[in-house]
């Protein structure tokens, strides 16, 4: 084993897994012994070391210098609890397949619901935000068949795709220059009729914008649509203490929507895949009703599979989530809340530094923890070209960003400017890991070198 002073994966916590495994083993001590039947340890060692070699061919998703896509390392307790549960390998489709883990799922999901202000709810975990949004729109389609689904033009593409799967009409609503759904444009469409559901995105995946929920709720009072909140990325920021007034106002009204989606495998510190769908009215559970006599037979309680479109689901995901929320409660002012507050604080600091650099043009200040900026150039085409080159040059130097094609008016709002009707490729940084001291200086030093190299091309 080579000795190095750089990054190291946590291995000390594996001793905790060994202790917990022995404790879990005690509950099955009355069972007759069985042969292990496992592979030869030396053969497994060879295979695992080969896996370790192959896994080196990855971007460092776990490191702050990976600031591209929405990838956040699971909390150590989540990794350990997931591993522990895998020795039993429960299936949370039915209580028969995951008795303890099903209870833990219900408790963990109830904790998320309380975070949003719901003491009563119907909900469960899913494989991710896509499946969770599918269930929310499926329920909406059952209640408003053949009626259109509306979402902002900056909403996740999954809503249009899911609407197609569900055979529901889908339409995009224009955004304002802050990348939020435009309430005036929404009302213009609502006046035409035929709308069953509006999706409000609280944390868009491109720039992290928060749709103006209070205004959308006011429109619901007049037009009577079903309101779904896609909080897959941004939902946990309801706990942050440093949101701007507009975002705070949106999260403070979230308890009034009809359904919510959140992804614990993003800011919830969970392994993939762990999504969650919540409904304010538990009565929608009747729409899931089905018979499965070969799985529901040991309990008269409601099985999770009876309120889910998915069948087999990993109980280990529920165990990991329960353990994380037990360690880091979902309350304002707590340790978990502080992690989110720190992420936004770092994003605001990065935005401020980039705004002071005449080589770049930043969009609006981040509402959550996503920073987007473009290269200051004479045309959007040249700006886009330089952004692509900086993206590549930064990666060569160990900083991994993302690219996003966005409306040029997000960066150049001047009325009548010829470039405001165009799109431009922007650089994008997701500041979702707790940045260490000096992180911004290191980040910008790499960006500076990458810009110099790109400008010389």
Image (tube, rainbow, N blue to C red):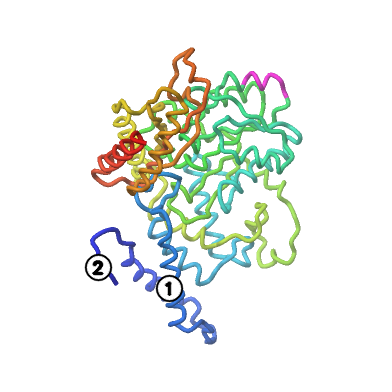
Q: Please name the residue that numbered disc 2 is placed on.
A: 3
Kindly check if marks 2 and 1 are in contact, taking CB atoms under 8 A apart as contact: no
Q: Position of residue 394 (x, y in %)?
A: 35, 43
x 63%, y 42%: residue: 136
| SS for callout 2 | loop
Relative placement, left or right, of 308 versus 360 is right
Q: Quadrant of residue 452?
A: top left
x 49%, y 46%: residue: 112
Q: Please name the residue that numbered disc 1 is placed on.
A: 21
x 54%, y 32%: residue: 154
Q: Is residue 259 above or below residue 42?
A: above
| Nearest to viewer (mark 2 / mark 1) | 2
Q: Which residues are magenta?
A: 187-193
Q: Position of residue 246 (x, y in %)?
A: 44, 26
- Of residue 144 and residue 180, the one placed in the foreground of this image is 180
Q: Is residue 374 above or below residue 432?
A: above
Relative placement, left or right, of 431 versus 425 is left
Mark 2 vs mark 1: which is more N-terminal? Answer: 2
């Amino acid at each position: 084993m080579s000795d190095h002073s750089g990054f190291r994966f946590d291995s000390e916590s594996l001793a905790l897994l060994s202790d917990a495994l022995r404790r879990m083993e005690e509950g099955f001590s009355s069972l007759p012994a069985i042969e292990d039947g496992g592979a030869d340890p030396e053969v497994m060692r060879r295979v695992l070391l080969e896996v370790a070699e192959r896994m080196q061919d990855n971007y460092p998703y776990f490191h702050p210098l990976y600031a591209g896509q929405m990838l956040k390392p699971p909390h150590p307790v989540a990794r350990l609890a997931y591993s522990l549960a895998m020795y039993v390998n429960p299936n949370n489709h039915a209580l028969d397949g995951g008795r303890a883990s099903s209870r833990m799922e219900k408790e963990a999901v109830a904790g998320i619901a309380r975070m949003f202000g719901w003491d009563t709810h119907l909900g469960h975990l899913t494989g991710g935000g896509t499946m969770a949004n599918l269930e929310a729109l499926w329920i909406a389609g059952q209640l408003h068949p053949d009626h259109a689904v509306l979402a902002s033009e900056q909403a996740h593409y999954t809503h249009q795709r899911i609407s197609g799967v569900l055979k529901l009409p889908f339409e995009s609503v224009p955004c304002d220059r802050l990348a939020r759904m435009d309430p005036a444009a929404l009302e213009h469409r609502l006046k035409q009729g035929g709308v069953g559901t509006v999706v409000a995105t609280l944390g868009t995946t491109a720039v992290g914008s928060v749709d103006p929920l209070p205004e959308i709720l006011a429109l619901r009072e007049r037009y009577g649509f079903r309101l779904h909140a896609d909080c897959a990325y941004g939902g946990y920021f309801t706990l942050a203490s440093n949101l701007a007034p507009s975002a705070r106002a949106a999260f403070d009204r979230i308890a009034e929507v009809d359904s919510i989606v959140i992804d614990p495998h993003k800011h919830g510190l969970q392994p993939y895949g762990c999504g969650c769908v919540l409904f304010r009215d538990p009565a929608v559970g009747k729409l899931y009703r089905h018979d499965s006599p070969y799985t529901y037979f040991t309990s008269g309680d409601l099985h999770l599979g009876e309120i889910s479109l998915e069948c087999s689901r990993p109980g280990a995901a529920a165990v990991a989530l329960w353990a994380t929320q037990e360690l880091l409660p979902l309350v304002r002012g707590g340790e978990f809340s502080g992690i989110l507050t720190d992420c936004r604080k770092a994003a605001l600091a990065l935005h401020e530094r980039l705004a002071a650099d005449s080589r770049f043009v930043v969009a609006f200040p981040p509402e959550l923890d996503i920073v987007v900026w473009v290269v200051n150039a004479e045309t959007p085409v040249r700006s886009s070209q330089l952004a692509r080159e900086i993206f590549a040059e930064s990666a060569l130097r160990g900083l991994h960003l993302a690219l996003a094609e966005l409306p040029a008016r997000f960066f150049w709002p001047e009325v009548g400017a010829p470039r405001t009707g165009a799109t431009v490729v922007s650089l994008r940084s997701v500041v979702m890991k707790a940045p260490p001291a000096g992180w911004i200086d290191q980040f910008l030093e790499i960006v500076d070198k990458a810009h110099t190299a790109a400008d010389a091309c």
